Amino acid sequence: MSTNTQTMAASPQHDLAKLETLLHEDHIAWNFGHMDHILPKRDIHAPSDKFRFSEEDRDLGIVRYNYGGQTSTVQQYMDKVHATGWLVIKDDTIATERYYSGYGRQSTAMSMSVAKSIVSLLMGIAFDEGAMENVLDPVTRYLPELAGSGYDGARIKDVLQMSSGVRFNEDYADPDAEIYTFLQDVFGESAMPITQFVRKLTRLQPPGQFQYKSIDTQVLCMLLERTTGKKPSAYLEEKLWQPLGMEYDAYWNTDLHGNEIAFTFVNAALRDYAKIGRLVLHQGTWNGRRIVSERWMNESIIPDRKDLMAGQADEFFGYQYQWWTPRGSDGSEVMARGIYGQHIYINRRENAVIVKTGVDPTVFNVHDDEAVTAYRAILAHLVD
């Protein structure tokens, strides 16, 4: 389907009532693989000309690693974090591919915040193409309707670095947190467009101080749509899904007005998430074709402020433009991370990509530093 004619997919089977049990232990694994049964969506079509990795299956679950004074196997880690799938690719060869809880090679897995890193790539392409001029531009230059909102005075770079200063609390333990207001306003009786929700947000502090908040990514999505003239899902299809030769169709869930929920809800197969990783692995090139400029790849990965360096933005990870860098990696390791254990891990030194999806009951990625330890052990094993 042409990206110019792409419309929101009719999904009569979606049932908003399932949002109530989206994260319940008995339902979460099924829900994360069937988001088209829960929310409306926009389809993202794979091309007929597909890129496929070579395959050489190895049992990497037996690889051992040391973490926190204990020795574990990779399979023990995957069991602990309730992985629904994991995939290891080195030198363009699939070394291991495993699925659980009813998932398989063609299954879509919901991205959670891995979507943020995909949005970052789309922002880079939009800048490369001249849709926006400078990351130091105020967001209100392109979105004048945000004048007077919490985003008034914030630059695009502030939003990319989650330093907008907007008041948006994502503490799920706080019943008054704005994340619950978002869910009620956007998916409740009022069915407010998410763009309207963004406009009513207020300022917590001046821009420039890191505070992780998903709603900033929604503003990036609004910038993409305004400056490219295309829905973000259509832009994703045109700029990444088609040129990267994705194997399977994907979809992006929306609010009830057809606006993509930018900070989550991309749904794709693991092999196709791995191709996003491969693009980053090769600094924005794909089989010799430049997809994202090298300038953007360098600018968007390595933190350029002290408060975003590893150990400050997060105990183990640094942050830049919607991407995470493990401590001590100097940009050679990059991660897209989503709660409940969604990962795209890229290791440039080892020419490798590891994708994992899951329903980690600890929710907030408390095992992500252990994940990096396990991933490094896997790649060391493959080199031996």
Image (cartoon, rainbow, N blue to C red):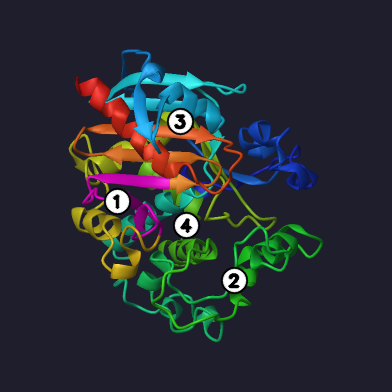
Taking the magenta stretch, the answer to whether it contains residue 19 is: no
- Residue 131 numbered mark, or none: none
Q: Residue furthest bottom?
A: 148
Name the N-terminal-most of marks 2 and 4: 2
Separation of residues labelled 1 and 2 (CA atoms): 33 Å
Separation of residues labelled 3 and 2 (CA atoms): 31 Å
What is the magenta range? Answer: 314-336
Q: Nearer the viewer, mark 3 or mark 1?
A: 1
Q: Nearer the viewer, residue 164 or 282?
A: 164
On screen, residue 347 above or below 169: above
Separation of residues labelled 4 and 1 (CA atoms): 37 Å
Q: Nearer the viewer, mark 1 or mark 2?
A: 1
Q: Within 10 Å of the Cα at label 2, are there few (<14), some (14-19), or many (20+) other Cα atoms?
A: many
On screen, residue 356 above or below 254: above
The residue under label 2 is 198
The location of residue 23, given as percent across then percent down, is 68, 43
The residue under label 1 is 327
- Residue 230 numbered mark, or none: 4
Question: Which element carries disc 3, helix, strand or loop?
Answer: helix
Question: Which element carries disc 2, helix, strand or loop?
Answer: helix
Name the N-terminal-most of marks 3 and 1: 3
From the viewer's perspective, tell me whether residue 313 is left or right of residue 205.
Answer: left
Question: Which element carries disc 4, helix, strand or loop?
Answer: loop
Q: Nearer the viewer, mark 2 or mark 4?
A: 2
Question: Can residue 357 be spotted in the picture?
Answer: yes
The residue under label 3 is 270
